[in-house]
Amino acid sequence: MLRIALLRRPVVVALGALAFAVVPMVANPYQVYAANLALIYILLAIGLNIVLGFAGQLAFANGAMFGVGAYATGLLRLDAGMPFWLAMPAGAVIAALTGFLIALPALRLRGLYLALATIAFAQFAVWVFVHWDGLTHGTSGIVLKPVDFAPLTKSASTGLYYVSLAVTIGFVALAWNMLRSRIGRAFVAIRESEHAAAALTIDLTRYKTYAYVVSALYAGVAGSLFACVVGAVVPEQFNLFQIVIQFCMVFVGGVGTLWGAVIGAVSLVWLQEALRGLQEVQEFGFGILLLAVIMFFPGGIADFLRRRIEGWQEPLRRVAPDEPAAPQRRS
Amino acid sequence: MLLAYLLSSGITSGALYALVAVGLVICYRTTSHINFSHGELFMVGGFIAFSLHVLWGVPYIPSLLIAVVAGGAIGLMTDRAVYRTLINAPPIAMVVATVAFSFVLKGIGRFLWGGQGEFVPFPPIADPAPVEAWGIAVFPQQLVVLAGALFCMALLTLFFRFTRAGKTMQATAESPRAAYLVGIRVERVYASTWAVSAALATVAAVLMAPLTQLTPDIGLGLLLKAFAATILGGLGNMPGAIVGGFLVGICESLAGGYVASSAQEVAAFVIIMIMLLVRPTGLFGERGRREV
């Protein structure tokens, strides 16, 4: 195990946050845009990891929630004339409410049935985005004006970037605290065994609902930022490929680890931007990557870091069969 | 008249959904996993037949047979590359892996046979003019499809009832451990299951290609229709899946004719969601037993 103080997690996290904070001062507008996308995908990957990696529910609805958040914010700004400051939280809340509505039927389903129902729901959502012309503007989608940050900064993209950064840091901190609290422990207990969790008087209905709503909230926040950063919302952005990218992030980073999701999101956004010129290989590339990670590196990057570098253990992680039980922190 | 037309086209596409659904069910019964790349197996099989028949001028029947063999080979590949590696992994890994594999196949399809939104035409194998039968106009192509699908289902029934391979598959579906103990080579059964299931998807694709057009994006929509069929019949119930397939075909055809043409695409999702909420065991499943 490497014992280098510089590689300890708090140091890496602080340096990462600092790097994100200085991006608009040193980078060109395209790089700012890409960094902003990375922030958005951090939120998405954490949201998916909460429901998939921590609560163990195989739900494919995250891409649809992302779309609901993006459409809600976009339409509130465009058609209802709401300012950004109001439309963004409103979009996130609408996505979280949709997540609650999804949770009600999804609570009854498990495993393959849940996967089937949520894939059908994801496709249904795309169909609604395309065909409810009166509300969603159909296949042509919606185009938004840049958000005005006039007194603070001249550049809309810089202003939006710092909003995204603040929101992302806030939500990462929220997730880090939540997952180490009673709620996070309940999620993991449900993932490991619903019967055992119920025997420990964990209210399955309540905590599963939390998982769906929190995950939808993260996806909704990400969606509302995405609508404003990209400036356009079209249905194809939220198809099954969207969810495959998110799965890729979670699996590459590490299922059931918070920092893994963050690392996975940043590295895959970087990869996707590097492949921008090669649109046609993206499906193949992400498919192969996801397949390879599941088959050969099921722990992802987080597992690698944890094994090699001291200070990357996370509480509540799943213990791999080939290692002894988690060494507790020596105090 | 409209009703008759809608019913005939619904039954035709229903027969194909039933074939695809039966492939899913065979795979599910034996391996207890759902193959989320089944729709892409369909797509690749259809395109292989397209290459043979349209691009290289091979007659229809030989191209069908070659495509079926090739489809079966891709099924074997799925078994080798994905299923066997993950046989002991948690079920989530298997689902996500087959979803990922579907994107790999879709990427290959796009690379070889055309990009987003491109459709390739497949010439009809029967006279395109409709014929009159009992006062209903029927396209001969539809009859060919229906006959082909029914023939395959009959063949499959015979396969399960009378051949050794079919019986070992059923035994493995019943209990892999017991099958292993009586000397069935379970791994081989898994391999042949994936091959048979993929071959069925290919047959459906080659039958369907002349009716619609092929595109690399055809897989997911078809997969969801097949899911709807399997869930209507009860997951793992083969006759149920066949009935379910016809029901899905008829439902979506009626929805397209009487509600709105865009409702046709969404019928399958609505069926899946309603069925899973109301009767997850399917139309024919017992009420008490729930494995959901």
Image (cartoon, rainbow, N blue to C red):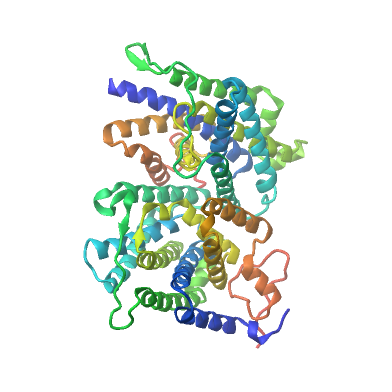
Closer to us: A312 or A319: A312
Image location (x, y in percent) of residue A114: 48, 51
The N terminus of chain B appears in which quarter of the rendering?
A: top left
Residue B201 visible in the displayed image: no
Residue depicted at 25% across the width and 71% down the height:
A83
Image location (x, y in percent) of residue A153: 33, 81
Q: Is residue B168 above or below residue A116?
A: above
Closer to us: A174 or A266: A266
Image location (x, y in percent) of residue B203: 56, 28
Residue at the far right in the pictured view: B183
| Quadrant housing residue A163 | bottom left
Q: Is residue B7 above or below residue A55?
A: above
Residue depicted at 56% across the width and 71% down the height:
A263
Total marks in image: 0
Closer to us: B159 or B250: B250
Residue at the far left in the pictured view: A80
Residue depicted at 40% across the width and 43% down the height:
B269
Residue A156 visible in the displayed image: yes
| Quadrant housing residue A3 | bottom right
Image location (x, y in percent) of residue A323: 72, 68
Q: Is residue B158 above or below residue A2?
A: above
